[in-house]
Image (spheres, rainbow, N blue to C red):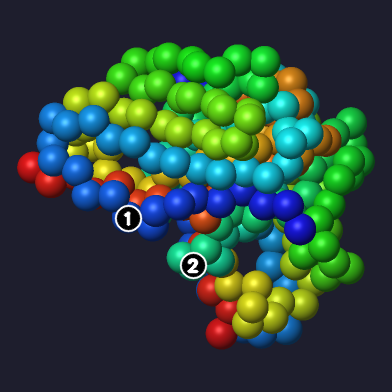
Amino acid sequence: EPEVTQTPSHQVTQMGQEVILRCVPISNHLYFYWYRQILGQKVEFLVSFYNNEISEKSEIFDDQFSVERPDGSNFTLKIRSTKLEDSAMYFCASSEAGAYGYTFGSGTRLTVV
Amino acid sequence: GESVGLHLPTLSVQEGDNSIINCAYSNSASDYFIWYKQESGKGPQFIIDIRSNMDKRQGQRVTVLLNKTVKHLSLQIAATQPGDSAVYFCAENRGNNRLAFGKGNQVVVIP
């Protein structure tokens, strides 16, 4: 069964450093997303991406965040200057047709120290 | 603001019994709902979905019920197994393919 692949599985970074979280969506999917989950809390939407541009972003997705699809397979989330409160699980997802058939990756656990 | 939420934080169920997990939503414009299962250290895994023009949908050992009148969604798991132990989230499509998740409900299966 096709999977969304995320790397690394765990990233530890110092406050103020830049991090890039990487995702390989399912190959025939056209919609890409990032969500995050702070420990013990619910999964929160960050951003959606379609046709090489952001289609929607949440209030969490401020100027410190950016997304990119640098080639035909990768989808990345960059946090420019990490803060302690950015510590969370970050999930990438992709879908073939809008909200239907969302598939999530296993996540990257980001720990900011 | 409008939100999706779950009534019970933890459900303990005997192996072989049926489980019912409930979810309340408040956005009457939502037209699509999904139940996800999340095991420790993993991402949300799709279980079953339902569109707002339906009130019941069945899968393998799972049934989702949608009551639009009271804005209530439930997930029924038949013959619960140890592998069903996980956190279960309901989610609704808020438009623009943006999913809003509930807080999650831990299911613990007692062997």
Label 2 SS: loop
**Residue A53: image location, x then y, percent:** 91, 41
**Mark 1 surroundings within 10 Å by alpha-carbon count, few (fewer than 14), some (14 through 19), many (20 or more):** some
Query: The residue marked by circle 2 belongs to what chain?
Result: A
Q: Position of residue A88 (x, y in %)?
A: 56, 66
The residue most toward the left is B111
In the picture shown, does residue A98 fall above or below A65? Answer: above
Q: As drawn, which residue projects farthest toward the front? A: B69
Judge the density around disc 2: few (<14), some (14-19), many (≥20) Cα neighbours within 10 Å: few
The residue drawn where x is 67% and y is 33% is A94
Question: Looking at this view, is B46 or A7 the one in front?
Answer: B46
Q: Nearer the viewer, residue A33 or B94?
A: B94
Can residue A23 be seen in the rendering of this structure? no
Image height check: is B1 above or below B12? Answer: below
Q: Chain of mark 1?
A: B
Which quadrant holds residue B22? top left
Residue B108, numbered label: none
Work out whether A85 lies above or below B94: below
**Horizontal arrangement in the rendering, residue B13 relative to residue A97 (left or right):** left
Say which residue appears at 13% left-offset and 36% top-offset.
B15
Q: Position of residue B102 (x, y in %)?
A: 56, 50
In the image: residue B91, left or right of residue A29 = left
> Is A51 left or right of A18, judged from the image as shown?
right
Give whichever of B42, B87 is nearer the camera. B87
Residue B40 drawn at (x, y percent) = 36, 53
Which residue appears at 13% of the width and 30% of the height?
B16
On residue B10, which mark appears?
1
Q: What residue type is disc 1 on?
A: Thr
Q: Secondary structure at mark 1?
A: strand
Residue shown at 23%/30% (left/top)?
B18
- The mark tally for this picture is 2
Reading the image, the residue beneath label 2 is A39
